[in-house]
Amino acid sequence: MRKKYIILTIVIIIFLTFIIIPEQIAKIYGNVYMKIHFPKMSLQCTNVEWSKYHDDYIISFKDKDSNTYSCTIGPKYFPVFLGQGLFNIEETYRGNYSK
């Protein structure tokens, strides 16, 4: 009986580690990054999903005017590096808020 609980606990830990937790890490990190680097845009994460094409997560944000911005965030199991698409957000921020 005790072996069943141990196996169940291991399965739950594996599930959380590889399925749920990386998306939550990406969401938290993305929100913090946007608040620090682009505070005037008021960007909030709306979606995080895995992209086989990019081999990274795609993270989407909405600003206070309901404009949507997306970029990649990776790696797969500890996504804390923003990548492709971030330049567009930086350019928009510089163009609209750095006056």
Image (cartoon, grey):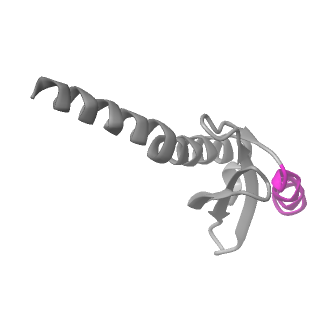
Residue depicted at x 63% and y 46%: 30
Classify the position of the N terminus by image quarter.
top left
Q: Main secondary structure of the magenta part?
A: helix
In the image, residue 32 sits, relative to residue 55, either above or below, namely above
Residue 52 locus on image (x, y percent): 72, 57
Q: Which residues are magenta?
A: 84-99
Q: How many marks?
A: 0
Residue 26 among those drawn in magenta: no
Left or right, 14 with respect to 98, comes to left
Residue depicted at x 47% and y 41%: 21
Residue 74 locus on image (x, y percent): 70, 42
Question: Between residues 6 and 17, which one lies in front from this camera angle?
Answer: 6
Residue 34 locus on image (x, y percent): 67, 47
Residue depicted at x 66% and y 62%: 60
* In the image, farthest residue toward the bottom: 66
Residue depicted at x 18% and y 32%: 4
Question: Between residues 33 and 24, which one lies in front from this camera angle?
Answer: 24
In the image, residue 29 sits, relative to residue 60, either above or below, namely above
Classify the position of the C terminus by image quarter.
bottom right
Residue 47's quadrant in the figure? bottom right
In the image, residue 3 sits, relative to residue 31, either above or below, namely above
Residue 73 locus on image (x, y percent): 71, 46
Question: Between residues 86 and 56, which one lies in front from this camera angle?
Answer: 56
Residue 26's quadrant in the figure? top right
